[in-house]
Image: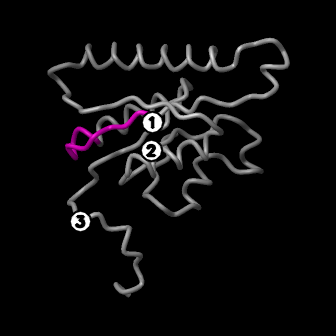
Amino acid sequence: MVDKLPPSFERGTDGPKVIVVGLDGSESSWRAAAYASGLARRQKALLAVVYIQPVLAAGAALGASVADTTGEVAEELMGEIRQAAERLRGAFEVRWEFHTFRGDPYNGLVQAADELKADAVVVGASEQAGHRFIGSVAVRLVKAGRWPVTVVP
């Protein structure tokens, strides 16, 4: 049974060293970030907070600068994270980094987890009703089977 495990799965450490959490500003993503923060603190792991900047061709056609808009969202999220970290300084010491990637949420999180050598991925549950039928980012991450994935409601 042990011979059947892929050799790349075990990184040779006790507990996760890097926990990736997807943050898009939704309530469930903030709950996921809070959960991942506690997990990172207890495990003494690096918390990699990841925002995926969507690439929307339709936005350019409507005259909106999509890159500017998504960049502003990333800056706002980063500011909110810094404020929360400052409020909790001393009580909860967590090492964290903020990263942005471009693309659709699933492929962006896969790229982030691969590049950051994630040991675990934490995401919020989808708040969109249509995802019950076509699958959410969380379900797709779980099905990929490349990292332990925690879905926070």
- Crowding at label 1, few (<14), some or many (≥20) Cα neighbours within 10 Å? many
- Identify the residue at horizontal 39%, vertical 52% (top origin): 120
Q: Position of residue 152 (x, y in %)?
A: 48, 41
The reply to whether discs 3 and 2 touch (Cβ–Cβ < 8 Å) is no
CA gap, disc 1 and disc 3: 26 Å
Badge 2 is on which residue?
122
CA gap, disc 3 and disc 2: 21 Å
Specify whether residue 132 is painted magenta: no
Q: Nearer the viewer, mark 1 or mark 3?
A: 3
Q: How many tags in the picture?
A: 3
The reply to whether discs 1 and 2 touch (Cβ–Cβ < 8 Å) is yes
Q: Is residue 56 left or right of residue 29?
A: right
Q: Amino acid at mark 3?
A: Gly
Quadrant for residue 3, please give it: bottom left
Between discs 3 and 2, the one toward the N terminus? 3
Segment colored magenta:
40-49
Between discs 1 and 2, the one toward the N terminus? 1
Q: Is residue 120 left or right of residue 63?
A: left
- Crowding at label 3, few (<14), some or many (≥20) Cα neighbours within 10 Å? few
In the image, residue 111 sits, relative to residue 27, either above or below, namely: below
Please state, as top left, top right, bottom left or bottom right, where the N terminus lies in the image: bottom left
Q: Amino acid at mark 2?
A: Val
Between discs 1 and 3, the one toward the N terminus? 3
Q: Is residue 71 left or right of residue 9?
A: right
Q: Which numbered tag is attached to residue 12?
A: 3
Q: Which numbered tag is attached to residue 32?
A: 1
Specify whether residue 44 is painted magenta: yes
- Identify the residue at horizontal 61%, vertical 39% (top origin): 105
- Identify the residue at horizontal 52%, vertical 47% (top origin): 111
